Image: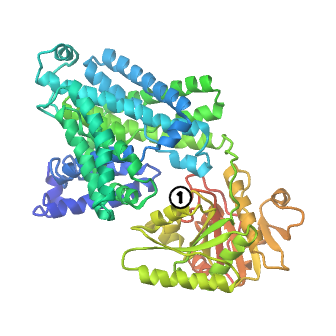
Amino acid sequence: MALLANAWGPPVLIGSVEATFLVLLIVVIFGPVIAERFRIPGIVGLIFGGALFGPFVLDWLPADGLVTALGAIGLLYLMFLAGATFDIQAFNANRRSAIAYGLLGFVIPFTITVLVVGFGFDVGLLAAALMGAMWASNTLVAYPEVQAAGLQKNRAVSAAVSAGVVADLLSLTVLAVVTATAVIELDPLDDTFARVANEFVQGQIEPTTPDPKLPLWLALPLLAAFCLWLLPKITQRFFVTIGRSRMQRFVFALAGMSAGAAVALLGGVEGLIGAFLAGLGMNRLIPTNGPLMERLEFVGAAIFVPTFLVSIGLNIDPALLVDRDTLVLGLVFTGFVVAGKTAAALLTSWIFQFSIAETGLMASLSFGQAASTLAIAQVGLSLGMFEQIVVNASVIAIVITALLTSYGTRYFAGRVPRDTDDVPPIGATVMVDVRDQGSDLDTFVALAGLLTRKDSGLAIPYLVAEEGELDVSTARIAASVDALAGHGYDADGVVRLSESFESGTVHVAEERGASMLMLAWSGPKYAADYLLGSGVDDVGRRSPVPTMAVRVVRRWERVVLSLGDLRVPWKREDARLAVDIALRLVPDGTELLVVAEDPAGSAALFDQDDPVEMIDSDSFSLRDLRPVDLAVAPGNVLRDELSNIGWRTSRALDDLNIVAVAGPHRLSISKGVTRRAVSANLSVSPTVAR
């Protein structure tokens, strides 16, 4: 088993805590990155990373050791965060359709699975019910596609999101009953419930929670009372007395999670149920956009949850994944999900009169399977109810459904009209990132001021700083405010302490009600950004408001706007945003130079009195840009252009003024949004005038 380990690495290191932790971190860092390069969800990369370094292949990570222990904590942490981040307001706003779709989305796939598995595979009722709970739940893997399309408030999306919580709650309830019943069967009690349980269970079961101290009928009410009544009171008392620091509150939240899991174990209930209820009980005391939640999500996303996924991979023999029986079972599991969720969506749309596109979007969002499915599968394996082939087939089903939910959501999102709620003008509140990224500060903040002038808005310079950087950041903010005042603008400055620039930026934008996010950008470095990632991409993907990346090294005398392909709705929307921004930045007495693939069709984006000179893209290239120009383009246009130019040409762009813009959750320069790229509208020349 350890032959490859002996061949590829020093045997003396394999199995040590130091080496194990190093290998784990390597998988956590590079597993998702490699998977996403092949258009595969990052979760699959973590699972297969665990399988590669696990006992069945390289044997660098033992099946019972540090990774398994951290993975068990990660599972509790995952369920705790699910309860702590549950959006109660969104659920109440769409509770009728959400409850209906949640119930149907659980009952239909659950019933199909139980009937097929129970009669076709001849397993016990408890095992069939547990497997039904696996495929009745769902994970919103494709929700970023909805964000990119601007459909977060669509009723079908809201129903799917809230219904996912309903389905997961019911799946967890089934899991609680099954695990507790399995424990009672092994240590029978002299009552009717135990005798009935004996009829349901086939074969010998090894529970993960042996020797329960309390019967189920007493343990469940005690668990609910502790997590939903007593724990919130204790938490509130702690927060207003001695728990004032962020670190104290973070540790207390972990203690609350562990306490909920421990109380659950008293009745033989799986600990993850208690962790979820503990998170639900502390929900109102941990603000979603606050620093405590930021730290909880950071630690979970960085260590605990990825480690849980890696630990799942340790139990997978990759050779079995290509086994014919495993593949067939994986396809059967996929059928349970697709058939059940589609039927539930059709019934819900018939009751609440959803359109065909909304129905497809609702069903596609619900196809995704991930964390909860793996959690239940792992519990079933540890209880002895499932064979290893079930876990292996579940991985195959998760990969297939991840692809189906991604492509299906993307397809139907393009056919659902965006909500037309009142949106503030982009210049109302512009958050201005004033990091030193190579731009001239005076010119940079002047550009921000021009964005606000039309709307009599406010430019808010901000910096995200780590501990120890407060003095330097405060001085930079003061200089930015003075520069804005020198141009006649009122300004306010913000310094935000945060562990990451991305999280701090998104939180400060939400707290200040930003209408536009303006990011300092070091300029196009396509190859490095593509390989190592880009802070602009990370913020742009998470930003809930229109976002722009700006690099200006000098004052400009002309604005050149590149529109790109206008046939795709979301690209046309970004082009409209670019038009609005470019018109605000045109120097007085000059015209906006518009480079368009279809000049006649692009004229509809402008008013008759706009100072515009329209030219065909075939007659303009990067060679024609001058150092005193300001190039403005949607992010997708710039990204496609950068992916096709040479290294020397890309380096030459460092001397130009460039602005890339995109709608909420869409700004991406190095990788692009998850849609098929289009050809850039600028023909690239090997040289650029300086």
x 54%, y 35%: residue = 159
Asked if residue 53 lies left or right of residue 335, the reply is left
Query: Residue 554 location in percent, x, y?
Result: 66, 85
Query: Residue 371 location in percent, x, y?
Result: 36, 42
What residue did someone put label 1 on?
A: 541
Q: Nearer the viewer, residue 33 or 569?
A: 569
Asked if residue 10 lies left or right of residue 79, the reply is left
Instruction: Determine the secondary structure under disc 1.
Output: helix
Quadrant hosting residue 411: top right
Rendered position, 300 above or below 124 = below
Mark 1 surroundings within 10 Å by alpha-carbon count, few (fewer than 14), some (14 through 19), many (20 or more): many
Q: Nearer the viewer, residue 563 or 517?
A: 517
* Residue 365 in sight: no
- Say which quadrant the C terminus sits in: bottom right
Rendered position, 123 above or below 616 = above
Quadrant hosting residue 86: top left
Q: Nearer the viewer, residue 124 or 678?
A: 124
Q: Amino acid at mark 1?
A: Arg
Asked if residue 197 lies left or right of residue 244, the reply is left
Q: Nearer the viewer, residue 610 or 404?
A: 610
Please count the marks in the image: 1
Q: Residue furthest right?
A: 608
x 21%, y 14%: residue = 196
Rendered position, 196 above or below 160 = above
* Residue 47 in sight: yes
Rendered position, 517 above or below 83 = below
Query: Residue 10 location in percent, x, y?
Result: 14, 64
Specify how the rendered protein is coloured. rainbow
x 32%, y 63%: residue = 244
Asked if residue 496 lies left or right of residue 240, the reply is right
Query: Residue 168 location in percent, x, y?
Result: 39, 34
